[in-house]
Amino acid sequence: MKKIFAAFFGVLLMYLISPMAAQAQQCNLSLKGQVLNADTGLPMAYVGIVIKETQQGVESDEHGHYQLANLCPGEYTLVCSHIGCDHAEQKLSLHSNSELDISLRENAVTLQNVVVSGTVGKRASTQTASELSGTELDAGKGLGLGEILKRLSGVSSLNTGATISKPIIQGMHSNRILIFNNGVRLEGQQWGSEHAPEVDPFNSERITVVKGAGSVRYGSDALGGIILMEPKPMRHNPGIGGELHLQSFTNGRSGIASGMLEGKLAKLPLGVRVQGTLKRAGNLQTPNYYLNNTGAAESNFSWSGKYQPENWVLETFYSYFYNQLGILSDSHIGNLTDLNNAIERGRPLQDGSFSYHLGRPLQRVLHETFRVKLSHALSENDKLTFQASRQFNRRQEYDAHRRYNVLPQNLDAPNIQFEITTWAAELNWDHRLGRNWQGALGSTAQKQINTVDRGALIPGFDNLDAGMYWTERHFKLGNPWEFEFGARYDIRRLHIGEQGTTIIDQNRDFKNWSATLGLLYTLNENLKLRFNTGSAWRSPLVNELFSSGVHHGSASYEQGNPDLQPERGFNNSLTLEGAHTQKWSFALTAYLNLVNNYIYLQPRAAPELTIRGAFPAFDYQQADARIMGLDWTGDLELYKNLHLESKISLINGWNQELHDFLIYMPPFRFDQGLKLNFNAQKHPDHPSFVRLGVLAVMRQQQAPATDYASPPPGYVRVDAEFFHTFEWGKQHLELGISVFNLFNTSYREYLNRFRYFTAEPGRNLGFRLKVPFNFSPK
Amino acid sequence: MKRISFKWSTLAILGLAVFGCEKDKNGGPDNEQELITTVALKFVGGGQTLTFTAEDKDGDGGKAPIIQPIALKANTDYSLSVAFSDASKTPAIDITTEVKTESNDHLVCFENTGAMNAPLQQDKDAAGKTLGLESTLKTGAIGTGTLKVTLKHMPSKSSANACATGETDAEATFNVTVQ
């Protein structure tokens, strides 16, 4: 075993070239170069290069380039921190500005290691993507996925009250976004705007958002984008390790504990991990009143195992997610009159008080995922992967009061219950053709059964999907152009069963293609230009086709349209990216997305009359739509360790047939922050920092006239954060303190569906502690 | 070979552990929908008993509710009883009893226009606050108007305008002729 390790962690120094003008004994030397695969000559992305003596570190970019600055002349040990090279070391003598290309030799074993670290597959570099990991991700884990992703430019969230939050990517949400949790496409009840994603963020170490039609590899229906949630790679050193997260927030007086424990055997290539999260929160508070019944309780659990004999990897993963969410009592309304009364009040009837009690209205959501993945390395460059998964989702909604005349045994039964079970299989061949082509060819199949146990809002249905995809990427060393293309073909059969007591028993067949093209042009060492264009489609979903009934949270009557056709999107985006070591970095994206047959809810002229009174009625309709915008994110070093961070998003959604704006488009956001790093020498991975952020959100001027109430005024909110990494004895600790809404400003958010009823939560002080631990046999 | 057998047996055990879980066994939707389909107003006075209903048997959507017009005598004292039922089932299910049982959580509200006079709620809930299932009414001169009857759930009865709070469980607007 040891021999294999020694061999495959070998680092070859290829060449040491061009010693530039000799420097005096000043610490202003730089070391740069590229990390390459010794066998193929292709660059290796995201390889960490750390100087052992000074702890200065840097990660290679997508093209393998790295740069270390402010070095003193001297003898150093260069450590590679990539999972594939496992802290391989190389001595280096530095006396002038130098270029050093590092070649990593992969063999079959390392190849596996490298490959499985990305659970879904490698991200193609031509795509416009942004990711959250490390401290930024840890800080938001206790707040849920929708809230975390707001830290990225161009991502906002659609909220239902303060407890339900789902991500919006470039103006699209719900079923126009795909979420992959540990390689499995999340199949829950995502069709409702008050249905939050059923995932535990504590299970993820890195979350990547691919904006736009993205890669065909993940599915055809991602018109808005893809969210990839990846767990921490399984440890590859024998021993036991893990981490513990403790978090608490004052608003809602919440407490969260999440722990992960993993072990790897020394004699067998077998590793296991268990992870769990417990969360309890009570009523939230706005600056002026409490929000009754806005608590939450969550308990999640997962385990995974990895068995890795030579050239094979077998991985299993199981997760259990159970969430109970209270919904603001005052938001639950009977009809149009109630809604008007509530809007007129503009705030809850009572001031409320603090309580952990979870009463009605209530949502209970359970989600289970089980996955088995088997990979076999055919050669260094070719790998076959087979994955099978099963997901089960149960969603229970409890209305403000139970139904009349219930049987005694049904007193606590939900008013609506949906259950969906999904089986999926995927076969993928990752390959390399010649020296410059790399790609994947694969097929997917999925079977889904959805039953509605109570209520008749949507019918029960089952789905059968099959798809094939092919994607290739071309890269040539020294050539500034890089491109990628992909194509995909999918078929879907949707069978609709019974709705309430009405038997529909109809089939809908859909089949179509999707394609993407990505180009990357490297202008110089600091600037890159990306262009992506693609076309994707999405078949209408069962709620869009057959919805019929009153949606309580929104006091609206929704009527499906059985004749809807699939949506076809054409996405185009252009990104200019720049980076100059620690000095500055930025990304500016302009995008234009055209969606033919965009499905939306159109208000009906006359309200629907029921025995509960009148409800505003909406019909599902289609029209050609256009969504375009700008995303900006930048970072500038103002002075030494003081950085200015800037994020701006601008978006416009237009219905080209009605000549009106699209609803729920994020208003103009202008987010600026000052961040002071310290202690970076000691902890280059997680430097300590203090940050002060100012968020300005304008009033949404581009809203359709057909809303219950006009968009709320703009607001300015100040947030602050402190993060410190330190040692307590031998134990490494990470401590974070955050203040959300520092000045306790009262404001409303256009993208919150409860803005009619209540202001947003007030000041929230958060504390978090992360305790990583590791016991390796010496 | 030994390794492979280990691998597959692991897989089999894991599979059993997870796929073996029993889920909801009640097999398919029950689709019971206990809702109010019928609001019935019983007027007793002037030597007559008159009943008028607002009914929507097929629930939300589909056919609109059928609301019978109310005809009352002028200058007459009436007692008014409101009843709720679910007529989508056979036999129809009475819901008024349940409203009475949970009287603290319910309130019957009236809104009148035109020649229709306001009914005066007579009954009290368990806590001594207005309930509204029983009321009295004195009609005035000849004319036309409307009467809106609303059943509120979880209203804030101590609120100044209690009828603007809570969730509406039933609501019907009757046309009224006083003759």
Image (cartoon, grey):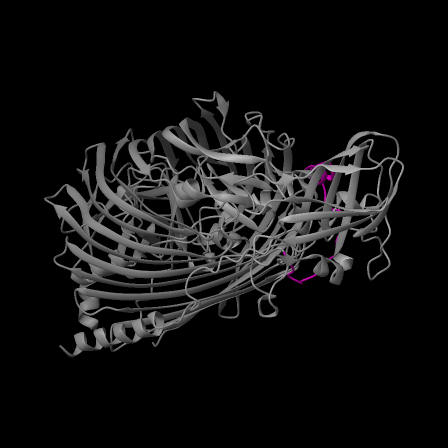
Residue sticking out furthest to the top: A659
The quadrant in which residue A511 appears is top left
Q: Main secondary structure of the magenta part?
A: loop
Residue A461 x/y as whole percent: 37, 52
Residue A170 x/y as whole percent: 44, 35
Q: Of residues B125 and A511, which is closer to you in this image?
A: B125
Q: Of residues A15 and A149, which is closer to you in this image?
A: A149
At 64% from the left and 35% from the top, the residue drawn is A716
Quadrant for the C terminus of chain A in the image: bottom left
From this viewpoint, is residue A267 visible? yes
Inspect the magenta stretch and tell me whether residue A547 lies in it: no
Inspect the magenta stretch and tell me whether residue A351 lies in it: yes
Q: What stretch is highlighted in magenta?
A: A340-360
Apparent side of residue A286 relative to residue B89 in the rendered image (left or right): right
Residue sticking out furthest to the front: B47
At 43% from the left and 43% from the top, the residue drawn is A546
From this viewpoint, is residue A350 visible? no
Apparent side of residue A26 relative to residue A358 in the rendered image (left or right): left
Apparent side of residue A634 relative to residue A107 in the rendered image (left or right): right
Quadrant for the N terminus of chain A in the image: bottom left
